[in-house]
Amino acid sequence: MSKNILEVNNLVKHFEVSNSVFSRNKKIVKAVDNISFDIKAGETLGLVGQSGCGKTTTARALCLLDPKTSGNVNFYNPDTKLMESIDDIDEDRLRVFRRNMQMIFQDPYESLNPRWTIQDIIKEPLEIHNIGSFSEREEAVVEILRTVGLTPPENYMSRYPHEISGGQRQRVSIARALIMKPKFVVCDEPTSMLDVSIRISIMDLMINLAKDLDVSYLYITHDLAVARYMCDRIAVMYNGKIVELANTEELLQNPVHPYTKRLISSIPVPDPAYKREVYEITQSDLDSISNLSDNKNDLYDTGNNHYVATHKIEGLL
């Protein structure tokens, strides 16, 4: 059995909001509300849900881009070959963590510095971590550009982001993340802003790189069709909570939770003569999810490694 590369236990991220700058009455937004999951080495876990459900907030908390409110995250350290907590880690351990966990952001138009050349953008992580000599870094940039399909590399190294297409920019983002040879990459909807015609090539590239480089992914998306193509397992998220988790085909063929059924029924079918059954969720169903207390946020095992949140919804189990 493959070892875990990441273990997330009871992760919570809350934000304080107020109606005005001078208001003393603050509300708490539970962006991520007591979620737990793990990812095995070489596995891709899809985190699926509508906009605002907490997917990106989860990703940013895992990558230490935003501090979490509570919970524990353990990450596999390839140097010690042990699972280690990322809480309160010292500077040396943080550098090891940064090398082995990278993130591909959603928008390639904003995640790349417009004043830097492609070569400088990709080479920056090597310089920050003081990896290799100048010539070795140059060679590493050339090699990773070939790996992500930007060939010949010499045609791209001196260009700026505005001089290449959106698909090529996303390949540069992938190259920047993978040049560190990480063990785990968080992918925050990396194809959602790309033309449909080039999405499949980017997804195929990421699948092949995962196999060749032994990389695990947390793949965030709102598109179940993309999740089916990319992921080994899928976790469905709603209102900061994971409501269902299963192997990809098991979840899509045998959904249990009403929200999962509603997501699946919203997938368009490329056949005008075929009418997919529409699954409606009542307001009481949504309230039962939103009002679920933290100590009842366990996932019930329905069999075949298929887990579903035990909400008080008629006919759920």
Image (cartoon, rainbow, N blue to C red):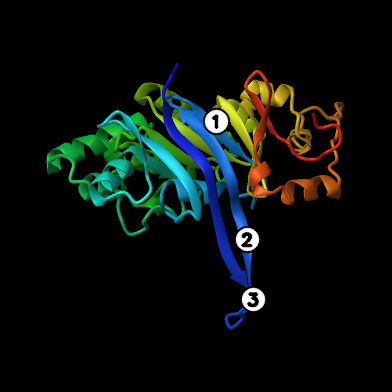
Q: Who comes first in sequence, dot 3 or dot 1?
A: 3
Q: Quadrant of the N terminus?
A: top left
132 vs 200, nearest the viewer: 132
Q: CA distance from mark 2 to mark 1?
A: 36 Å
Which class describes the residues within 10 Å of circle 2: few (<14), some (14-19), or many (20+)? some
- Are the two marked residues, 2 and 1, in contact with CB atoms closer than 8 angstroms? no
Which class describes the residues within 10 Å of circle 1: few (<14), some (14-19), or many (20+)? some
Q: Which residue is mark 3?
A: 25
45 vs 84, nearest the viewer: 84
Q: Who comes first in sequence, dot 2 or dot 1?
A: 2
User: Does dot 3 land on a helix, a strand or a loop?
Assistant: loop
Q: Which residue is mark 1?
A: 200
- Residue at horizontal 20 percent and vertical 35 percent from the top: 139
Residue 203, percent from left and from top: 51, 31
Closer to the observer: label 2 or label 3? 3
User: Does dot 2 land on a helix, a strand or a loop?
Assistant: strand
> At label 1, which amino acid type do we have?
Ile
Q: Is residue 183 left or right of residue 292?
A: left
- Residue at horizontal 64 percent and vertical 76 percent from the top: 25
The answer to whether 228 is drawn above or below residue 145 in the figure is: above
261 vs 143, nearest the viewer: 261
> At label 2, which amino acid type do we have?
Val
User: Does dot 1 land on a helix, a strand or a loop?
Assistant: helix
